[in-house]
Image (spheres, rainbow, N blue to C red):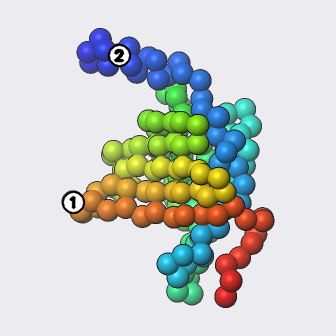
Amino acid sequence: MSLLSTLMAATLLQAPAPDLSWLAGYWLDCSGGREASETWSDPRLGLVVGSAVTVRNGRSGFESAHIGPAPDGGLAYFARPEGAPATPFRLIESGPQRVVFANPDNDFPHRILYQREGDVLTARIEGADDDETRSVEWTFNKAPLNARCPS
């Protein structure tokens, strides 16, 4: 590892965790024939807890996640789709209302992005799947807890 890489890594590990309070709330996406919702807690001592439910074509799916300290330092997004063991994605970029997490060793996705503008939260996963680059994006609107899409 070069001196510059070592210094950059050390700076990242020492940087304060980003303020993720903008992620908190209940978010609903009623596009593309699906009903997708995500619920995120406010940050508590460096921990943010989330859950997602998706309903489409008469089927439902879920994911639980949390954002918190990684075992080896830094911050990570830990995804558990359908109750699977947690897969960590390390924080690689953050801004006032934007975060990007990455795990290049995961099959799909490789990156998880969240960005908020007003009452709209965009979530995106991207990466290569069987050597084909692809992405999936959700556009969530802030909604009252447990709101549902119109039938």
- From the top left corner, tell me how far across and down residue 144 is, in percent: 78, 65
Residue in front for this viewpoint, 10 or 137:
137
Q: Which residue is mark 1?
A: 131
* Picture quadrant of residue 82: bottom right
User: x%, y% of residue 26?
Assistant: 71, 60
Which secondary structure lies at badge 1?
loop
Residue 37 visible in the snapshot: no
Residue farthest front in this picture: 118
Q: Sort mark 2 into few (<14), some (14-19) or many (20+) by Cα contacts within 10 Å.
A: few
Q: How many marks?
A: 2
Q: CA distance from mark 1 to mark 2?
A: 31 Å
- Neighbours of disc 1 within 10 Å: few (<14), some (14-19), many (20+): few
The residue at which mark 2 appears reads as 6
Q: Specify the quadrant of the image occupied by residue 35.
A: bottom right
Residue 58, image x, y percentages: 57, 87
Amino acid on which the number 2 mark rests in the picture: Thr
Is 12 rendered above or below residue 123? above
Q: Is residue 17 above or below residue 62?
A: above
